[in-house]
Image (tube, rainbow, N blue to C red):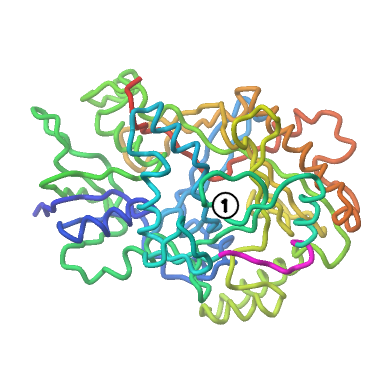
Amino acid sequence: MVMSFDYIVVGAGSAECVVANRLSEKHSVLLLEAGEDDDSWQVRVPPAALFAILNPEYEWGYKHGPESFADDRILNLERGKVMGGSSAINLMAFTRGHKADYDEWAQNTECSEWTFEKLLPFFKKSENHVSRNSEFHGKTGEMQIVTQKSDRDIIQRFLSSVKDAGFGLVDDPNAGEFEGFFQPDYNVSEDGVRQSASTCFIDPIRHRSTLTVQTGLTVDRVIIDDTSKRCTGVQCIREGQKICFTCNKEVVLSAGAFGSPCILQRSGVGPEDLLSSLGIDVIENLPGVGANLLDHVRFEHYLQVKPGYSVNENLRTSGSEIMESALEGLTDEKVRQIYRSHGLDPSIPSEELIGQIRTGPNLPQPDVQIYMLPFSVELLNHEKPRGLDLISFIINVEKPMSHGFIHITSREALTDPKIVMNYLKEREDLECLMRGLKISRNIASQRYLKEIVINEVAPGENCVDLESYIRQNVRSAYHPVGTCKMGVPS
Protein backbone atom coordinates (compact mmCIF):
# COMPACT_ATOMS: atom_id res chain seq x y z
CA MET A 1 0.00 0.00 0.00
CA VAL A 2 1.29 3.47 -0.89
CA MET A 3 0.81 6.00 1.92
CA SER A 4 -0.10 9.58 0.98
CA PHE A 5 0.34 12.88 2.84
CA ASP A 6 -0.04 16.57 2.11
CA TYR A 7 3.69 17.19 2.47
CA ILE A 8 6.75 14.94 2.54
CA VAL A 9 9.84 16.40 4.22
CA VAL A 10 13.08 14.62 3.32
CA GLY A 11 15.62 14.59 6.13
CA ALA A 12 15.18 15.46 9.80
CA GLY A 13 17.98 17.97 10.16
CA SER A 14 18.12 21.59 11.26
CA ALA A 15 15.82 23.04 8.61
CA GLU A 16 13.55 20.05 8.08
CA CYS A 17 12.49 19.67 11.72
CA VAL A 18 11.33 23.29 11.78
CA VAL A 19 9.49 22.89 8.47
CA ALA A 20 7.77 19.70 9.63
CA ASN A 21 6.73 21.39 12.86
CA ARG A 22 5.21 24.42 11.14
CA LEU A 23 3.52 22.53 8.30
CA SER A 24 1.97 19.90 10.57
CA GLU A 25 0.05 22.61 12.41
CA LYS A 26 -2.44 22.56 9.51
CA HIS A 27 -1.43 19.75 7.15
CA SER A 28 -0.53 16.06 7.20
CA VAL A 29 3.26 15.70 7.07
CA LEU A 30 5.60 12.75 6.62
CA LEU A 31 9.11 13.39 7.97
CA LEU A 32 11.74 10.97 6.66
CA GLU A 33 15.14 10.37 8.27
CA ALA A 34 17.85 7.91 7.17
CA GLY A 35 19.26 7.64 10.69
CA GLU A 36 17.62 6.68 13.97
CA ASP A 37 16.49 8.57 17.07
CA ASP A 38 19.01 10.76 18.94
CA ASP A 39 18.23 9.21 22.33
CA SER A 40 21.75 9.09 23.78
CA TRP A 41 23.98 10.82 26.31
CA GLN A 42 26.41 11.37 23.43
CA VAL A 43 23.87 13.75 21.90
CA ARG A 44 22.28 15.26 25.00
CA VAL A 45 25.35 16.08 27.16
CA PRO A 46 27.13 19.03 25.47
CA PRO A 47 30.83 18.20 26.09
CA ALA A 48 30.19 14.64 24.85
CA ALA A 49 29.85 16.09 21.33
CA LEU A 50 33.17 14.54 20.31
CA PHE A 51 31.73 11.07 20.97
CA ALA A 52 28.68 11.89 18.84
CA ILE A 53 30.50 13.40 15.87
CA LEU A 54 32.91 10.45 15.65
CA ASN A 55 30.22 7.79 16.16
CA PRO A 56 29.55 5.99 12.84
CA GLU A 57 25.99 5.28 14.02
CA TYR A 58 25.25 9.02 13.91
CA GLU A 59 27.05 10.22 10.78
CA TRP A 60 27.18 9.39 7.07
CA GLY A 61 30.88 8.57 6.79
CA TYR A 62 31.45 10.88 3.82
CA LYS A 63 34.95 11.21 2.41
CA HIS A 64 36.15 13.76 -0.11
CA GLY A 65 39.11 13.98 -2.42
CA PRO A 66 41.75 13.40 -3.48
CA GLU A 67 42.11 17.14 -2.98
CA SER A 68 44.51 18.29 -5.70
CA PHE A 69 45.30 21.61 -4.03
CA ALA A 70 45.57 20.19 -0.49
CA ASP A 71 48.37 17.64 -0.86
CA ASP A 72 46.14 15.10 -2.67
CA ARG A 73 44.60 13.97 0.61
CA ILE A 74 41.34 12.07 1.09
CA LEU A 75 39.55 13.52 4.12
CA ASN A 76 36.57 12.81 6.33
CA LEU A 77 33.64 15.19 6.48
CA GLU A 78 31.15 14.24 9.17
CA ARG A 79 27.45 14.99 8.57
CA GLY A 80 24.63 13.93 10.87
CA LYS A 81 22.69 10.76 10.06
CA VAL A 82 20.30 10.85 13.03
CA MET A 83 17.16 12.65 14.10
CA GLY A 84 18.25 16.29 14.25
CA GLY A 85 20.85 15.79 11.52
CA SER A 86 24.10 17.64 12.09
CA SER A 87 22.46 19.69 14.86
CA ALA A 88 22.61 16.45 16.91
CA ILE A 89 26.39 15.99 16.51
CA ASN A 90 27.82 19.49 16.00
CA LEU A 91 29.60 21.67 18.56
CA MET A 92 26.46 23.76 19.21
CA ALA A 93 27.73 27.32 18.60
CA PHE A 94 24.68 29.44 17.71
CA THR A 95 25.71 31.91 15.02
CA ARG A 96 23.32 33.52 12.54
CA GLY A 97 26.02 35.09 10.43
CA HIS A 98 26.68 38.61 9.26
CA LYS A 99 23.80 40.89 8.23
CA ALA A 100 25.60 41.81 5.01
CA ASP A 101 25.55 38.19 3.80
CA TYR A 102 21.76 38.01 3.95
CA ASP A 103 21.36 41.38 2.27
CA GLU A 104 23.83 40.36 -0.45
CA TRP A 105 21.82 37.19 -1.16
CA ALA A 106 18.63 39.20 -1.46
CA GLN A 107 20.26 41.67 -3.84
CA ASN A 108 22.24 39.30 -6.05
CA THR A 109 19.91 36.29 -6.31
CA GLU A 110 16.53 38.01 -6.58
CA CYS A 111 15.46 36.29 -3.33
CA SER A 112 14.10 39.57 -2.03
CA GLU A 113 12.66 38.05 1.14
CA TRP A 114 16.08 36.93 2.38
CA THR A 115 17.31 40.22 3.84
CA PHE A 116 18.40 40.09 7.47
CA GLU A 117 15.59 42.45 8.43
CA LYS A 118 12.91 40.24 6.86
CA LEU A 119 14.33 37.01 8.28
CA LEU A 120 14.83 38.32 11.82
CA PRO A 121 11.18 37.71 12.87
CA PHE A 122 11.54 34.05 11.88
CA PHE A 123 14.77 33.70 13.87
CA LYS A 124 13.04 35.20 16.88
CA LYS A 125 9.95 33.02 16.46
CA SER A 126 12.01 29.84 16.91
CA GLU A 127 14.14 31.15 19.74
CA ASN A 128 13.92 31.20 23.52
CA HIS A 129 17.09 33.02 24.50
CA VAL A 130 17.71 32.41 28.17
CA SER A 131 20.59 34.89 28.50
CA ARG A 132 19.66 37.91 26.36
CA ASN A 133 16.86 40.45 26.28
CA SER A 134 16.90 42.62 23.17
CA GLU A 135 15.10 43.38 19.93
CA PHE A 136 17.26 40.76 18.21
CA HIS A 137 16.13 37.77 20.29
CA GLY A 138 12.98 35.85 21.00
CA LYS A 139 11.85 34.51 24.36
CA THR A 140 8.91 32.26 23.46
CA GLY A 141 10.25 29.93 20.76
CA GLU A 142 11.00 26.23 20.93
CA MET A 143 14.80 26.39 20.91
CA GLN A 144 16.58 27.44 24.10
CA ILE A 145 19.88 29.32 23.73
CA VAL A 146 22.41 30.29 26.39
CA THR A 147 25.48 32.52 26.39
CA GLN A 148 28.82 31.24 27.64
CA LYS A 149 30.48 33.46 30.23
CA SER A 150 33.57 31.58 31.36
CA ASP A 151 35.81 32.80 34.14
CA ARG A 152 38.49 30.17 33.47
CA ASP A 153 41.90 31.83 33.56
CA ILE A 154 42.88 30.88 30.01
CA ILE A 155 39.66 32.40 28.62
CA GLN A 156 40.38 35.63 30.47
CA ARG A 157 43.90 35.60 29.01
CA PHE A 158 42.38 35.13 25.55
CA LEU A 159 40.12 38.14 26.14
CA SER A 160 42.95 40.35 27.40
CA SER A 161 45.24 39.35 24.54
CA VAL A 162 42.77 40.12 21.75
CA LYS A 163 42.12 43.53 23.32
CA ASP A 164 45.85 44.21 23.62
CA ALA A 165 46.24 43.22 19.96
CA GLY A 166 43.76 45.93 19.01
CA PHE A 167 40.60 43.89 18.43
CA GLY A 168 37.22 44.75 19.85
CA LEU A 169 34.98 42.58 22.00
CA VAL A 170 31.44 41.88 20.85
CA ASP A 171 28.63 41.41 23.35
CA ASP A 172 26.05 39.91 20.96
CA PRO A 173 27.36 38.20 17.81
CA ASN A 174 23.80 37.56 16.58
CA ALA A 175 22.63 41.16 16.40
CA GLY A 176 23.45 41.65 12.71
CA GLU A 177 26.67 43.50 11.99
CA PHE A 178 29.62 42.59 14.14
CA GLU A 179 33.40 42.42 14.08
CA GLY A 180 35.63 41.28 16.92
CA PHE A 181 35.84 38.49 19.48
CA PHE A 182 33.09 37.06 21.66
CA GLN A 183 32.13 34.26 24.00
CA PRO A 184 29.54 32.38 21.94
CA ASP A 185 25.88 31.60 22.32
CA TYR A 186 25.10 27.88 22.35
CA ASN A 187 22.17 25.71 21.30
CA VAL A 188 21.94 24.42 24.86
CA SER A 189 19.09 24.61 27.36
CA GLU A 190 19.25 26.33 30.71
CA ASP A 191 19.69 22.96 32.40
CA GLY A 192 22.53 21.95 30.07
CA VAL A 193 20.92 19.76 27.39
CA ARG A 194 21.81 20.01 23.69
CA GLN A 195 19.03 21.71 21.76
CA SER A 196 19.08 19.76 18.52
CA ALA A 197 16.43 20.50 15.92
CA SER A 198 14.72 17.22 16.74
CA THR A 199 14.75 17.86 20.49
CA CYS A 200 13.23 21.31 20.06
CA PHE A 201 10.84 21.01 17.13
CA ILE A 202 9.86 17.33 16.80
CA ASP A 203 9.92 15.67 20.22
CA PRO A 204 7.31 18.05 21.73
CA ILE A 205 4.85 17.40 18.85
CA ARG A 206 5.25 13.65 18.28
CA HIS A 207 1.68 13.27 19.51
CA ARG A 208 0.22 15.27 16.60
CA SER A 209 -2.05 13.16 14.43
CA THR A 210 -0.89 15.23 11.45
CA LEU A 211 2.78 14.25 11.88
CA THR A 212 4.29 10.90 10.90
CA VAL A 213 8.00 10.31 11.52
CA GLN A 214 9.80 7.44 9.77
CA THR A 215 13.44 6.64 10.59
CA GLY A 216 15.89 4.21 9.02
CA LEU A 217 14.74 5.09 5.49
CA THR A 218 17.14 6.17 2.74
CA VAL A 219 15.44 8.32 0.10
CA ASP A 220 16.46 6.96 -3.29
CA ARG A 221 14.76 9.50 -5.53
CA VAL A 222 11.87 11.87 -5.89
CA ILE A 223 9.03 10.71 -8.15
CA ILE A 224 8.37 13.15 -11.01
CA ASP A 225 5.31 12.88 -13.24
CA ASP A 226 6.37 12.45 -16.89
CA THR A 227 3.69 14.77 -18.24
CA SER A 228 3.36 17.58 -15.71
CA LYS A 229 6.96 17.38 -14.47
CA ARG A 230 5.47 17.77 -11.00
CA CYS A 231 7.04 15.97 -8.04
CA THR A 232 4.42 13.64 -6.60
CA GLY A 233 6.30 11.65 -3.98
CA VAL A 234 9.48 9.79 -3.04
CA GLN A 235 10.91 6.31 -3.37
CA CYS A 236 12.83 5.03 -0.34
CA ILE A 237 14.88 2.02 0.64
CA ARG A 238 14.70 0.25 3.99
CA GLU A 239 16.60 -3.00 4.56
CA GLY A 240 16.78 -3.60 0.80
CA GLN A 241 13.06 -3.07 0.22
CA LYS A 242 11.69 -0.21 -1.89
CA ILE A 243 8.91 1.87 -0.32
CA CYS A 244 6.99 4.69 -2.00
CA PHE A 245 5.14 7.61 -0.44
CA THR A 246 3.04 10.16 -2.32
CA CYS A 247 1.97 13.71 -1.51
CA ASN A 248 -0.96 15.92 -2.40
CA LYS A 249 0.97 19.19 -2.24
CA GLU A 250 4.78 19.21 -2.16
CA VAL A 251 7.96 17.33 -1.39
CA VAL A 252 10.34 19.43 0.68
CA LEU A 253 13.80 18.19 -0.30
CA SER A 254 16.20 19.39 2.36
CA ALA A 255 18.66 16.55 2.81
CA GLY A 256 21.73 18.75 3.06
CA ALA A 257 24.43 19.91 0.68
CA PHE A 258 25.38 16.29 -0.04
CA GLY A 259 22.08 14.43 0.23
CA SER A 260 19.83 16.73 -1.78
CA PRO A 261 21.89 16.91 -5.01
CA CYS A 262 22.45 13.14 -4.97
CA ILE A 263 18.71 12.49 -4.68
CA LEU A 264 18.02 14.92 -7.52
CA GLN A 265 20.69 13.38 -9.72
CA ARG A 266 19.31 9.87 -9.18
CA SER A 267 15.88 11.30 -10.05
CA GLY A 268 17.05 12.55 -13.46
CA VAL A 269 17.63 16.18 -12.47
CA GLY A 270 21.22 17.34 -12.86
CA PRO A 271 24.14 17.44 -15.32
CA GLU A 272 23.10 15.62 -18.49
CA ASP A 273 26.51 14.11 -19.19
CA LEU A 274 26.76 12.63 -15.70
CA LEU A 275 23.24 11.19 -15.69
CA SER A 276 23.52 9.71 -19.17
CA SER A 277 26.82 8.04 -18.31
CA LEU A 278 25.04 6.22 -15.47
CA GLY A 279 22.03 5.20 -17.53
CA ILE A 280 19.65 7.60 -15.82
CA ASP A 281 16.90 9.15 -17.92
CA VAL A 282 17.35 12.93 -17.97
CA ILE A 283 14.22 14.77 -16.88
CA GLU A 284 15.90 18.15 -16.58
CA ASN A 285 19.44 19.08 -17.55
CA LEU A 286 20.60 21.28 -14.66
CA PRO A 287 24.42 21.39 -14.51
CA GLY A 288 24.28 23.35 -11.25
CA VAL A 289 22.88 20.41 -9.26
CA GLY A 290 25.89 19.19 -7.30
CA ALA A 291 28.13 22.07 -8.43
CA ASN A 292 29.04 25.28 -6.56
CA LEU A 293 30.05 23.30 -3.44
CA LEU A 294 31.48 25.69 -0.86
CA ASP A 295 32.83 25.12 2.64
CA HIS A 296 34.68 26.98 5.35
CA VAL A 297 38.23 25.62 5.18
CA ARG A 298 40.40 25.65 8.31
CA PHE A 299 43.71 24.71 9.87
CA GLU A 300 45.12 24.82 13.40
CA HIS A 301 47.72 27.01 15.05
CA TYR A 302 48.87 25.05 18.14
CA LEU A 303 50.71 26.50 21.12
CA GLN A 304 52.23 24.57 24.02
CA VAL A 305 51.51 26.26 27.35
CA LYS A 306 52.61 25.87 30.94
CA PRO A 307 50.80 23.16 32.96
CA GLY A 308 47.38 24.14 34.29
CA TYR A 309 46.19 26.26 31.36
CA SER A 310 45.28 23.66 28.73
CA VAL A 311 42.38 21.29 29.45
CA ASN A 312 43.80 18.55 27.20
CA GLU A 313 44.52 16.31 30.17
CA ASN A 314 41.05 16.96 31.62
CA LEU A 315 39.50 15.86 28.33
CA ARG A 316 41.76 12.82 28.04
CA THR A 317 41.09 11.49 31.53
CA SER A 318 37.36 12.22 31.44
CA GLY A 319 37.09 10.61 28.01
CA SER A 320 38.91 7.49 29.23
CA GLU A 321 36.64 7.19 32.25
CA ILE A 322 33.54 7.61 30.12
CA MET A 323 34.69 4.90 27.70
CA GLU A 324 35.43 2.51 30.56
CA SER A 325 32.07 3.25 32.22
CA ALA A 326 30.19 2.88 28.93
CA LEU A 327 30.75 -0.87 29.09
CA GLU A 328 28.48 -0.95 32.16
CA GLY A 329 25.95 1.54 30.80
CA LEU A 330 25.83 5.30 31.24
CA THR A 331 23.15 7.77 32.21
CA ASP A 332 23.27 11.47 31.34
CA GLU A 333 23.86 12.35 34.97
CA LYS A 334 26.72 9.88 35.31
CA VAL A 335 28.44 11.45 32.29
CA ARG A 336 27.94 14.91 33.78
CA GLN A 337 29.45 13.76 37.07
CA ILE A 338 32.51 12.43 35.25
CA TYR A 339 33.07 15.76 33.47
CA ARG A 340 32.64 17.70 36.73
CA SER A 341 35.11 15.46 38.52
CA HIS A 342 37.70 16.30 35.88
CA GLY A 343 37.21 20.06 36.14
CA LEU A 344 34.99 20.51 33.07
CA ASP A 345 31.60 22.24 32.80
CA PRO A 346 29.05 19.62 31.65
CA SER A 347 26.49 22.27 30.66
CA ILE A 348 28.34 23.66 27.62
CA PRO A 349 30.27 21.95 24.79
CA SER A 350 33.49 23.83 25.49
CA GLU A 351 34.89 27.08 26.79
CA GLU A 352 36.15 29.20 23.93
CA LEU A 353 36.51 32.57 22.31
CA ILE A 354 35.49 33.18 18.69
CA GLY A 355 36.58 36.06 16.47
CA GLN A 356 35.20 37.42 13.22
CA ILE A 357 37.84 39.77 11.84
CA ARG A 358 39.01 41.53 8.70
CA THR A 359 42.56 40.74 7.61
CA GLY A 360 42.81 44.01 5.68
CA PRO A 361 41.49 47.57 6.20
CA ASN A 362 39.71 47.79 2.84
CA LEU A 363 37.57 44.66 3.21
CA PRO A 364 33.83 45.35 3.60
CA GLN A 365 33.31 42.70 6.31
CA PRO A 366 35.21 39.97 8.20
CA ASP A 367 36.97 37.42 6.00
CA VAL A 368 38.52 35.23 8.71
CA GLN A 369 37.13 33.44 11.73
CA ILE A 370 39.42 32.40 14.59
CA TYR A 371 38.39 29.95 17.31
CA MET A 372 40.51 30.16 20.46
CA LEU A 373 40.26 26.91 22.43
CA PRO A 374 41.99 25.74 25.64
CA PHE A 375 42.64 22.31 24.10
CA SER A 376 43.81 20.71 20.83
CA VAL A 377 41.59 19.01 18.27
CA GLU A 378 43.66 16.11 16.95
CA LEU A 379 40.94 13.54 17.73
CA LEU A 380 38.38 15.60 15.84
CA ASN A 381 40.81 15.54 12.90
CA HIS A 382 41.29 11.74 13.16
CA GLU A 383 44.89 12.32 14.25
CA LYS A 384 46.90 10.90 17.12
CA PRO A 385 47.04 13.36 20.06
CA ARG A 386 50.44 14.89 20.68
CA GLY A 387 50.17 14.39 24.45
CA LEU A 388 51.11 18.00 25.25
CA ASP A 389 49.48 20.88 27.10
CA LEU A 390 48.18 22.65 24.01
CA ILE A 391 45.82 25.47 23.17
CA SER A 392 44.42 25.98 19.69
CA PHE A 393 43.74 28.87 17.38
CA ILE A 394 41.58 27.43 14.58
CA ILE A 395 41.71 29.72 11.54
CA ASN A 396 39.15 29.47 8.77
CA VAL A 397 38.18 31.34 5.63
CA GLU A 398 34.80 33.07 6.00
CA LYS A 399 34.07 33.74 2.32
CA PRO A 400 35.87 31.02 0.33
CA MET A 401 36.48 31.46 -3.38
CA SER A 402 37.23 27.79 -4.18
CA HIS A 403 34.28 25.74 -5.46
CA GLY A 404 33.92 21.97 -5.48
CA PHE A 405 31.29 19.44 -6.57
CA ILE A 406 29.41 16.29 -5.62
CA HIS A 407 28.42 13.66 -8.18
CA ILE A 408 26.72 10.32 -7.75
CA THR A 409 28.82 7.38 -8.94
CA SER A 410 25.96 4.95 -9.45
CA ARG A 411 22.20 4.95 -9.79
CA GLU A 412 22.10 2.96 -6.53
CA ALA A 413 21.26 5.06 -3.47
CA LEU A 414 23.68 3.34 -1.09
CA THR A 415 26.78 3.90 -3.26
CA ASP A 416 29.19 6.56 -2.05
CA PRO A 417 29.23 9.76 -4.12
CA LYS A 418 32.32 11.46 -5.52
CA ILE A 419 32.98 14.61 -3.48
CA VAL A 420 35.75 17.07 -4.27
CA MET A 421 35.89 20.26 -2.21
CA ASN A 422 38.80 21.83 -4.17
CA TYR A 423 40.13 23.47 -1.00
CA LEU A 424 42.66 26.22 -1.83
CA LYS A 425 42.15 25.94 -5.57
CA GLU A 426 41.87 29.72 -5.57
CA ARG A 427 45.02 31.26 -4.15
CA GLU A 428 43.06 33.95 -2.32
CA ASP A 429 41.81 31.31 0.13
CA LEU A 430 45.39 30.28 0.93
CA GLU A 431 46.50 33.88 1.35
CA CYS A 432 43.50 34.56 3.59
CA LEU A 433 44.58 31.71 5.90
CA MET A 434 48.15 33.02 5.92
CA ARG A 435 46.91 36.48 6.90
CA GLY A 436 44.80 34.85 9.60
CA LEU A 437 47.84 33.05 10.99
CA LYS A 438 49.73 36.33 11.15
CA ILE A 439 46.91 37.78 13.26
CA SER A 440 46.78 34.65 15.41
CA ARG A 441 50.51 34.86 16.10
CA ASN A 442 50.16 38.54 16.98
CA ILE A 443 47.47 37.72 19.55
CA ALA A 444 49.62 34.95 21.02
CA SER A 445 52.53 37.38 21.40
CA GLN A 446 50.58 39.69 23.70
CA ARG A 447 51.55 39.80 27.37
CA TYR A 448 48.85 37.65 28.97
CA LEU A 449 49.37 34.77 26.57
CA LYS A 450 53.11 35.25 26.18
CA GLU A 451 53.44 34.69 29.94
CA ILE A 452 52.19 31.11 29.61
CA VAL A 453 53.22 30.04 26.08
CA ILE A 454 56.25 27.74 25.93
CA ASN A 455 56.50 27.45 22.15
CA GLU A 456 54.56 27.23 18.91
CA VAL A 457 54.05 23.56 18.07
CA ALA A 458 52.33 23.98 14.72
CA PRO A 459 53.06 25.26 12.15
CA GLY A 460 56.17 25.93 14.23
CA GLU A 461 58.34 29.00 14.52
CA ASN A 462 60.91 27.44 12.17
CA CYS A 463 58.43 26.44 9.46
CA VAL A 464 60.06 27.68 6.23
CA ASP A 465 57.37 26.57 3.78
CA LEU A 466 54.13 27.84 5.26
CA GLU A 467 52.18 27.34 2.03
CA SER A 468 53.02 23.64 1.93
CA TYR A 469 52.20 23.24 5.61
CA ILE A 470 48.76 24.77 5.17
CA ARG A 471 48.01 22.68 2.08
CA GLN A 472 49.00 19.56 4.04
CA ASN A 473 46.79 20.41 7.01
CA VAL A 474 43.61 22.17 5.89
CA ARG A 475 40.27 20.45 6.38
CA SER A 476 36.58 21.16 6.72
CA ALA A 477 35.00 23.43 9.31
CA TYR A 478 31.79 21.39 8.72
CA HIS A 479 29.74 23.96 6.80
CA PRO A 480 29.22 22.62 3.25
CA VAL A 481 26.66 24.55 1.19
CA GLY A 482 25.71 25.61 -2.31
CA THR A 483 24.90 22.47 -4.30
CA CYS A 484 21.19 23.27 -4.87
CA LYS A 485 21.27 27.01 -5.30
CA MET A 486 18.37 29.42 -5.05
CA GLY A 487 17.75 32.54 -7.06
CA VAL A 488 18.51 33.31 -10.69
CA PRO A 489 19.37 30.42 -13.05
CA SER A 490 22.93 29.99 -14.30
Q: Is residue 349 magenta?
A: no
Image quadrant for the C terminus? top left
Height in image: 56 above or below 331? above
**Residue in front for this viewpoint, 74 or 427:** 427
> Residue drawn at (59%, 45%), measured in percent from left and top?
178
**Residue in front for this viewpoint, 442 or 12:** 442
Tell me the residue that label 1 is attached to.
173
**Residue in front for this viewpoint, 369 or 478:** 369
Height in image: 454 above or below 397? below
Residue neighbourhood size for the residue with mark 1, other residues' Cα within 10 Å, grouped as few (<14), some (14–19), many (≥20): many
> Residue drawn at (35%, 58%), measured in percent from left and top?
125
The magenta segment is 147-155
Height in image: 163 above or below 308? above
Residue 264 locus on image (x, y percent): 29, 34
Image quadrant for the N terminus? bottom left
Q: Amino acid at mark 1?
A: Pro
Height in image: 431 above or below 79? above
Q: Secondary structure at mark 1?
A: loop
**Residue in front for this viewpoint, 364 or 339:** 364
The picture quadrant where one finds residue 156 is bottom right
Residue 404 locus on image (x, y percent): 50, 28
- Left or right of 364 in this view: 124: left
Q: Is residue 153 magenta?
A: yes
